[in-house]
């Protein structure tokens, strides 16, 4: 099986000079949350993401010429984000005004301490073509989030460009707004998703990861769930007034129930109303009717 060490060598990178970094939990980047939802952060707020991984405790990236950054994904897997060159670091006492202000903002959110340093991390174009495509097995258990580049890591998959996670089943669907954008913009790379989501009507759930609020909707057009979700991909809110004031980059889409095309529209809407009642989204969520 091809390993990450093999791939580094293919791209003329010395694994002994690399630190492997797996960032993140399933939380979003906002005040009072301990860690960012890394992949969303990387996709939508690249400059802040670079800040986030630059501020570290002393010696975290010492003796490394590069870091290979990954986002934690399902189970023990990790999605490759990119390579950064390590060009030394500065202690807090040597920060200029701009760097001090950026650090202060992060310090409030994460409780970071003044013994941290800021690594000068410079994006390296090597392996850029594999960003958000290369999937590795990080390993089981509570393994360290920073490891040596020589640590054995099996390559599980290299996705086609602009593809999202493999479709497994309707009840495992869990997509972010950026995923919907990729589905809409490159249907060929995500053909199985397009086929599966177009094949059923259904009731879906949108969760605002930032506020925890829920919105229940239904899809009953001739393109099924895919056709309805394509509207969200185009404008973020799907023309739902209740969602227009929210930051759709924090939206997470899942499916509550699939229904065959034989179901009349009124029957689909009745199922939608049943889910709204069960989940209390009129009283406590984002549904107004």
Image: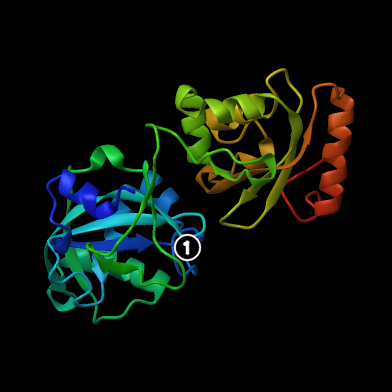
Circle 1 sits on which residue?
Answer: 25
**Nearest the camera: 186 or 208?**
186
User: Which image quarter: residue 265?
Assistant: top right
Q: Which residue is the extreme one toward the top?
A: 222
Q: Is residue 253 left or right of residue 267?
A: left
Residue shown at the point (86%, 49%) measured from the top left: 277
Residue 70 higher or lower than 111, as above or below: above
Q: Where does the C terminus fall, quadrant-wise?
A: top right
**Nearest the camera: 277 or 76?**
76
Judged from the image, the secondary structure of the residue bearing numbered disc 1 is: loop
Residue 7 higher or lower than 218, as above or below: below
- Percent coordinates x, y for residue 121 in the rendering: 18, 58
User: Which image quarter: residue 130?
Assistant: top left
Q: Is residue 99 left or right of residue 70?
A: left
> How is the structure coloured here?
rainbow
Q: Residues within 10 Å of mark 1 (few under 14, many from 20)?
A: some
Q: Is residue 279 left or right of residue 165?
A: right
**Nearest the camera: 115 or 81?**
81
- Percent coordinates x, y for residue 6 in the rendering: 22, 50
Q: Is residue 237 left or right of residue 183?
A: right
Residue shown at the point (34%, 66%) measured from the top left: 105
Q: Which residue is the extreme one toward the front?
A: 1
- Percent coordinates x, y for residue 276 in the rendering: 82, 46
Residue shown at the point (41%, 64%) measured from the top left: 139
Q: How many marks?
A: 1
- Percent coordinates x, y for residue 216 in the rendering: 74, 43
């Amino acid at each position: 099986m091809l390993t990450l060490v093999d791939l580094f060598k293919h791209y003329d990178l010395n694994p002994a000079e690399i630190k492997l970094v797996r960032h993140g939990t399933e939380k979003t980047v906002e005040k009072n949350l301990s860690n960012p939802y890394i992949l969303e952060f990387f996709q939508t707020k690249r400059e802040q993401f670079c800040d986030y991984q630059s501020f570290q405790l002393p010696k975290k990236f010492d003796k490394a010429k590069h870091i290979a950054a990954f986002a934690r994904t399902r189970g023990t897997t990790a999605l490759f984000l990119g390579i950064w060159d390590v060009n030394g670091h500065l202690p807090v006492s040597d920060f200029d005004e701009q760097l001090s202000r950026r650090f202060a903002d992060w310090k409030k959110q994460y409780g970071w301490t003044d013994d941290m340093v800021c690594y000068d991390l410079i994006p390296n174009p090597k392996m850029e073509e594999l960003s958000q495509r290369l999937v590795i097995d990080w390993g089981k258990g509570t393994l360290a989030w920073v490891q040596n580049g020589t640590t054995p890591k099996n390559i599980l998959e290299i996705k086609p460009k602009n593809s999202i996670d493999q479709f497994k089943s309707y009840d495992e669907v869990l997509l972010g707004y950026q995923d919907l954008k990729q589905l809409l913009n490159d249907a060929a790379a995500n053909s199985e998703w397009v086929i599966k989501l177009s094949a059923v009507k259904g009731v879906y759930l949108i969760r605002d990861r930032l506020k925890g609020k829920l919105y229940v909707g239904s899809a009953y057009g001739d393109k099924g769930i895919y056709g309805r979700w394509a509207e969200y991909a185009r404008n973020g809110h799907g023309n739902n007034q209740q969602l227009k004031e929210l930051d759709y980059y924090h939206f997470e889409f899942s499916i509550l129930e699939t229904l065959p095309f034989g179901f009349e529209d009124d029957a689909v809407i009745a199922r939608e109303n049943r889910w709204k009642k069960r989940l209390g989204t009129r009283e406590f969520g984002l549904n107004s009717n």
